[in-house]
Image (cartoon, coloured by chain):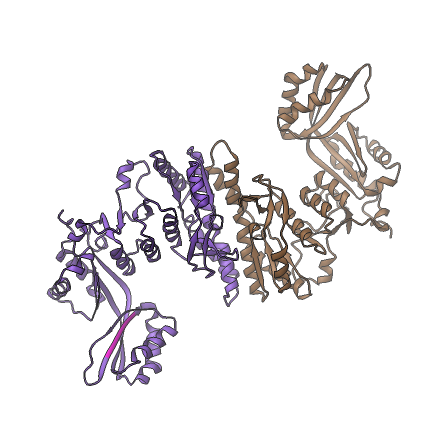
Chain colours: A purple, B brown
Amino acid sequence: MGSTERIRNVAKRVAKWVRAGHQLVVVPSAMSGETNRLLGLAKELSPDKPSAQSFRELDQIAATGEQVSVGLLSLALMAEGLEAVSYAGWQVPIRTDSSFTKARIQAIDDVRVRADLAAGKVVVITGFQGVDEQGNITTLGRGGSDTSAVAVAAAMKADECLIYTDVDGVYTTDPRIVPEARRLQTVSFEEMLEMASLGSKVLQIRSVEFAGKYRVPLRVLSSFTPWDIDLAEEASSGTLITFEEDEKMEQAVVSGIAFTRDEAKITVVGVPDRPGIAYQILGAIAEANIDVDVIVQNVSHGGRTDFSFTVNRNDYARALDILKGGVGPATGAAEVTGDPRICKVSIVGIGMRSHVGVAAKMFRTLSEEGINIQMVTTSEIKTSVVIDEKYMELAVRALHKAFDLEQAPAA
Amino acid sequence: MGSTERIRNVAKRVAKWVRAGHQLVVVPSAMSGETNRLLGLAKELSPDKPSAQSFRELDQIAATGEQVSVGLLSLALMAEGLEAVSYAGWQVPIRTDSSFTKARIQAIDDVRVRADLAAGKVVVITGFQGVDEQGNITTLGRGGSDTSAVAVAAAMKADECLIYTDVDGVYTTDPRIVPEARRLQTVSFEEMLEMASLGSKVLQIRSVEFAGKYRVPLRVLSSFTPWDIDLAEEASSGTLITFEEDEKMEQAVVSGIAFTRDEAKITVVGVPDRPGIAYQILGAIAEANIDVDVIVQNVSHGGRTDFSFTVNRNDYARALDILKGGVGPATGAAEVTGDPRICKVSIVGIGMRSHVGVAAKMFRTLSEEGINIQMVTTSEIKTSVVIDEKYMELAVRALHKAFDLEQAPAA
């Protein structure tokens, strides 16, 4: 929520749903810039070495952004003639563990909220935060408001959880790269999970995981839609993330093309092919707190193999240093090479499970464009390739066309 | 607390006290301007007609200002190498009634705070707020942070409650009017109460009342004192509001001259002197939610008397309308007159109880300056006169001199 004007529009939109007979629980975000402002103040005053206690105080501070929002939205709802009541996470309560700044929701008490809904009130709950067993305020970390909304929807067994974002749904790929990209009316939970983890930043992956765990139907729709459009139109807009695999969904073999630019590749060349090598390499990387994404190890030749993986580009230099510095030689590797100028392109589709030849079609398409494939990994519903980053747009466009994604699947 | 720089200075000051062996509970205010900013946002969005529910939301919003402060101060204390922990009112908890925006403290649980102090921590508690029986956040209204500090000091049975304000103590009168005004080293609780209610805006009167109820020794001192002055010097600076009437205090018959400008006088002339008249007049005023300060009714002549009282100048026109419009004639009064250009000047001193002739000296002093006295009221430790506002400075200066207030009382 940006200005008070935007809060007023959110209130009008909520009022529209309520007047159509729906019971609503609303989980607004902090006003834009507020969380950064608060964390900026905290940073100025923080001790050099953060501790569990200082993280506790960060949460005490950051949680206020959403508390202001719920109060303001409740007032705006009252100004619309509705009854409304706001709760901070601890008032519901939303119970979390004690991992300050990145807490996980453990339980939500729905008694108070149900009573309010039954009394005809709109309930407005702070996102991003909860309370631990000792009564400390915790926050869920960035994007936690989405997760809170899904968790509340799960606790309330809501018909649907509507996530108003700055995009109007999930697309077959990024429309900035492929103008013909098409908004998906539905996408399966598993596909959404793959797309979220592959860099489609529509939803925080944690909120999608949460929705999956509790089977909460999730609709991603645009907060820029005028509040006064027809309710039926709004209710069917965006993209529904669903758990039921109906026939229609089976029609689309590939649902979308995901990609991520900010990776880098490292290869430990000619390591002896014996047990413990993978651990020896990745253990050192994990110890340095570096996340690894794609990992590829192929069959060996003459007792030696190449071990490759990708890391976030920001961690590339550090990871390379670690391996060249000691870990690589210690494994008996011939050399350690790397390339920070790669990208990952993936085709995602729940239909891939039952269709052969999908990966082959992907490889042929790339080959026809003269794009060399450096690494390949596959999962049940996804095939990813690592390629030179200069070919990224070309690859995405070619694959989007090859899998007919600009067309809605035949009924 | 203004900027992060000021918060850092507060932390350094607290650290000085802690290193000298004191256990400290700190109740910081919101950062300057923050409460107004929050209430401004709320005002933009509020319904036209406020309700108990909308006041609840105001408190939900306004309480965040102090929550940010306690978190920031705790971080700054950690940066000073201290252990610190912050609590919002509900975490202590500080229990209040449910009068949103003007709640009253009912009880403070000291268990958690005592355990932290015993563990060597500085405890930082939000002022201005608490939690009601239903778990709603309440605020105490403006100036509530002082009251919170005193209430916490009472609950903890603190040796002293230090209130850092923008003045360096309680003066014999306003130094802007009498440059010779002298800071009082000690002042009795009763005197402070009279001075606070008479417009010496050093402390909120509610916090003084609270200190009196629980006999909390209160020291008013300046937040502008450099944090690194000698601790003994700081500990004896400002003004101590005390409950023990030692000999030294008895020496000063009059401790200070208080005054207030923003009053107006109304007289109902020639009302029949019969039971119920005072109620008939003031009942109508109270019903319009207008506070009355001085009330004077003198003996009657020929069965008729004049009934006079003062109100805040902002309420003057409204009060006059009410009385002229119907209530006045209904009492059988000859007429209703008023004057918005009056002021009230008072001498306050616990010694007045045992000294005769103090009021007489006041009247003589005013008479010598040619100042006409319009109304007089007295209490055990105070004599107030209502005079033309143009004589206010003159009266204050003359009285300050007449009672030798520029001199410290002889030991």
The picture places residue A2, in percent across and down from the top left corner, at: 40, 46
In the drawing, does residue A365 fall left or right of residue A284?
left
Q: Is residue B29 above or below residue B231?
A: above
Residue B37 visible here: no
Q: In front here: A324 or B116?
A: B116
Residue B141 picture location, percent across and down: 59, 42
Using the image, determine if residue B154 lies above or below residue A322: above
Image position of B172 (left or right of A212): right
Q: Position of residue A41 (x, y in %)?
A: 50, 57
Q: Quadrant of residue B403?
A: top right
Q: Residue at x 22, y 49 (%)?
A: A184
> Which span of residues is magenta-colored?
A306-310
Q: Main secondary structure of the magenta part?
A: strand
Q: Is residue B301 above or below residue B73?
A: above
**Res B245 seen here:** yes
Which image quadrant is residue B114 in? Answer: bottom right
Q: Residue at x 51, y 62 (%)?
A: A54
Q: Is residue B8 magenta?
A: no
Q: Which picture quadrant has residue A73?
A: top left
Q: Is residue A319 left or right of residue B237?
A: left
- Give the mark count: 0
Q: Position of residue B95 (x, y in %)?
A: 60, 47
Image-based side of B212 in relation to B129, left or right: right
Residue at (54% x, 52% y) in the render? B67
Name, please, the residue furthest toward the right: B356
